Image (cartoon, helix red, strand yellow):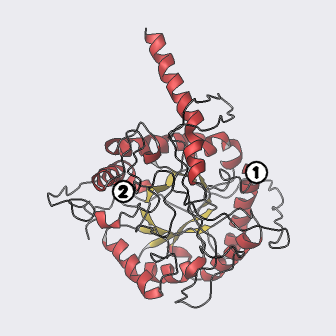
Amino acid sequence: MQHLARLAVLASALVASATARSIHAHHRNLHDKKSPTTTEAWAPAESAANGTECGCYTYTTTIAVGEWRLVETTPETSSVVVVPTTSSVVVPTTTSAPPPPPTSSSSAKAYTPPAPSSSAAPAPSYSAPPQHQASYNQGSGQNSSPSSGSIESNGNQWAMTYTPYDSNGGCKSASDVSSDISSIHAKGFNAVRIYATDCNGPQNVGAACAANGMKMIVGIYIDNAGIGGKTDEQIDTLCSWGQGKWDMVEMVVAGNEAIFNNYCSAQEMADFVQHVRSKFRAAGYNGPVTTTEPLGTIQNNKATICPAVDVIAANIHPFFNTDISAANAGTFVASQLGDLSDCCNGEKEAYNLETGWPSHSSMGLTNGLAVPGADDQKTAIEQIMKHAGGKSAVFSYQNDPWKAAGALGVEQYWGCSNLFSG
C-alpha cells in the first residue's frame, strides 16, 4: 500500500507538471504594455521627467514559476512525461490584450553575443537582504477596501514591484511616482522592482527611491522582437542614468520570462546576461546581474543559466497552483525558493522576483483551492511575508485596470500595497 501511495503522489505531480503551461500560456501576453489603438513599433522613453505617453511594450506575465495550475488544453512535450487531459477548465478570454506588432529585421539591431570567456563571471560584491522574523497585526475591522486589518511593517519586506502607469495605462507624472514610492517606503519595503525603462522609470522612480533611502531592482525587458535594438537602448539608458547612483541599485534583471515566452533561447539569454554584465561593469556597477523565469524553465535549463547569473531568480506565484490555498502560499513559496537554489547546487543566492495573490475575479472564478478575494489576498501575502518576505518582490503596488481580464478574470487585481500598514 505504501508503494501504491507513493506512485499516486508521483502521478499527481506529473499530471500537474504536464498541465502547468496551459494556464501560463493563456496569460503570457496579457501584461504587454501597449496602446489599445495602435500597433506601432516600440519607442524609447521620452526625456521629459513628466512624460504622459508610454511609447513602449512592457511588461510582465503575472503567472510564473514551476508551480502547477490548471488543466492542459493540448498535450505538452516534456522531458519527463506527457499527460494529455480529456477536459479543460480554462475559458480563453475574449478580451485579451491586442497582439504584439509585427517585427522586421530592419527594426532592431542584430545582437552579437560576447566572445566566450575563459573564466567564470566574477562574484558580485553583494550581500543578501537581511532576513527577519515577521509579526503581524491581524486587525479586527470591517472588510472595507479590500480587507480587514493590515500587515504590520516589520522589516521582513524586501521589495515591491512597481509600474509607473495610471489607471488608463498612461505614464504617471514624476510627482505621482514620488508619492507612490514614498508610500511603499512608509509601508516597510526596502526596494522597488521596475521592469524596463519606459515612462522615465529609472529617472522618476530612481529620484523617489533616493529621496526615501530605498534600493532599486532595475530591468531590461525583452519582448517578442527578441534581443537587439530595444534591449540595447534600455542598457544604454540604464548605464547612463546609473552614473553616481549605482549604490542604490540592488540587482539588474535581464528579461522577464523571455525564455518561457520563446522570445529567446536559454543560450541566447545566458549570452545576453554576460553582455549586460560587461556593459554595466564598464559603467561602474558591480552588483548582481541575473534573469528571471518560471521555476520550471530554470530547472529545464539550469546547466545553461546557472553559470551565467550572479544570483538565481524566478517568479513564484502560488495562486496558479490549484492545490495551494491562501493559507499555504507562504510555505509553498519558501519550498519553491529551496528548489530554485538547488538548481545551482546551492551556490547562488535564490530570489523570488514576482509573487502575489489577486483580490478579485471579474468572472467569479477560482483556481481549485486558490481563491481570488480580498481576505484570501491578505492571508496569502501575510504568509508569503512570514516565510519568504526577505527574498521576495511582492506583485504589485496597485491594481491595473488597463490590463485585459485574462482567463480567470484576475489580471487587473493584484494591487496589494493597501494591505500594509504605514
Please state which of the two labelled residues, at mark 2 or mark 1, is closer to the viewer.
Answer: 2
User: To which residue does mark 2 refer?
Assistant: 360
Real-space CA distance between mark 2 and mark 1, rounded to the nearest whole angstrom: 38 Å
- Residue visible at 60% across and 49% down? 25
Which residue sits furthest left?
140
Residue closest to the eye, 283 or 380:
380
Instruction: Give how far across and how far down residue 150 sits, in percent.
Output: 24, 61
Q: Quadrant of the C terminus?
A: bottom left
User: To which residue does mark 1 refer?
Assistant: 267
Number of residues whose C-alpha sits closer than 10 Å to that of mark 2, classed few (under 14), some (14–19) or many (20 or more): many
Looking at the rendered structure, the number of numbered marks drawn on it comes to 2
Residue 345 seen in the figure: no
- Residue visible at 66% across and 40% down? 300
The quadrant holding residue 83 is: top right
Q: Secondary structure at mark 1?
A: helix
- Type of the residue with mark 1: Gln
Instruction: Give how far across and how far down residue 234 sits, in percent.
Output: 67, 74
**In the figure, is residue 118 to the left or right of 76?**
right
